[in-house]
Image (cartoon, rainbow, N blue to C red):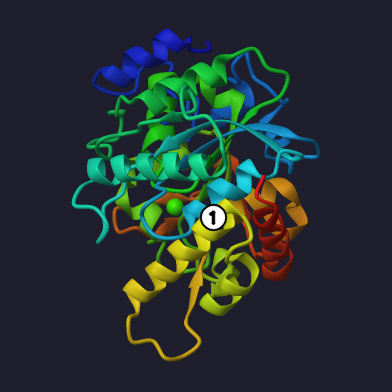
Amino acid sequence: MRATAVDRRSWIAGSGLGAAGWWVSGALATASGASPLWSQQQASGALGGTLEQRLAPPTAKVQAVLDTDTYNEIDDQFAVAYALLSPQHMEIEAVYAAPFQNERSKSAGEGMQKSYEEILRILGRLSRKTEGYAYLGSERFMAAPRQPVESDAARNLIAKAMQPRTSPLYVLTIGAPTNVSSALLMEPAIRDRIVVVWLGGQPLSFPTAREFNLQQDLHSSRVLLDSGVALVVIPTRNVSEHLRTTVPEVQHHLKGKSPIADYLATEYEAYTQWKSPHAGYPLSRVIWDISAIAWLIEPKWVPTEVVPSPGLSDQYTWERPTGRHPVRFATYCSRDAIFNDLFRKLQRGS
Ligand SMILES: [Ca+2]
């Protein structure tokens, strides 16, 4: 028997797995444990066919939302602008502020608030509206496996995902996935109506999965990997890590070229100077998050492979149990092609 959304909400709020449980100890399974739930219990409102079909690289323009810890360093800003300047390939319906905690914020909530303010600055440079478009996200990370964090962003994502559509909503997740995973827990029916493209973790061959987005909210990261949502993972080391640029390159291509190009060049210079004030050598920084946008524009720039979804241990290592549902993992990024497209669009600026 397939669980309704109401059924699922009730066990999420309750003590644990009911007869119509959604996932079990990190392994997607039916109540009998006989076979993966995704193959048998796809919601009647599923979009884009089967899970395997939703995992296929897009071949036409998509509708998307962007979930971003925009102020945590200097890469999300480029990704937000890149997405908004690629209307031939994606329509960005909303931008959500994600929580983060590092040297630029004292708490997850402060990080989210600073990200929201940065989103507003970027939208301003692009002369875009902010009302009903930029949303505040989670004030904290998930505190337990099945305890979503309520936020405007999570509620808006649910509303957007449940709207009548003819194809899945792409959820570009380039921070800790608290907003997205909370929405999945608050309304599990969105699972079969979205495709999550997540910048997070390390390649599956690495001895650790540790990475900033993944490790900040272990519970949320597990929801993405365990829920059976269509998931495209872009790891960092040796994959999105290829997306490096330097101050001289940014100055040459972006300085003074357009309001948004000039803003990003200035911010890149300031951040680089702040991180390495005495660098007298060819310092580079990685613009990790543009990889998620690039995959939607040209999947060949970010080659991927379909693999069984890994589990995630308490020690932040990948686990490879058998019988898991498929996810898609990126293996490389074509640095020159992506930066060529990005810089060209930023120079145009609108
Ligand atoms: Ca980010």
Q: Position of residue 142 (x, y in %)?
A: 27, 37
Q: Is residue 346 left or right of residue 198?
A: right
Residue at the farthest left position: 106
Q: Nearer the viewer, residue 284 or 280?
A: 280
Q: Position of residue 176 (x, y in %)?
A: 38, 46
User: Can you give x and y, in whole percent of width and height, for residue 201 in the image?
Assistant: 45, 57
Mark 1, ligand 1, within 8 Å: the answer is no
Residue extending farthest to the bottom is 280
The amino acid marked with disc number 1 is: Phe
Question: At 71% from the left edge and 38% from the top edge, which residue is drawn?
Answer: 87
Query: Residue at image x 45%, y 21%?
Result: 156
Q: In this figure, what is the number of numbered marks?
A: 1
Is 52 on the left or on the right of 158, as rendered? right
Locate residue 275, reporting x and y percent.
33, 74
**Residue 226 visible, this orientation:** yes
339 or 343, which lies in front? Answer: 343
- Which residue matches tag 1? 78
207 vs 175: above or below = below
Element assignment for label 1:
helix
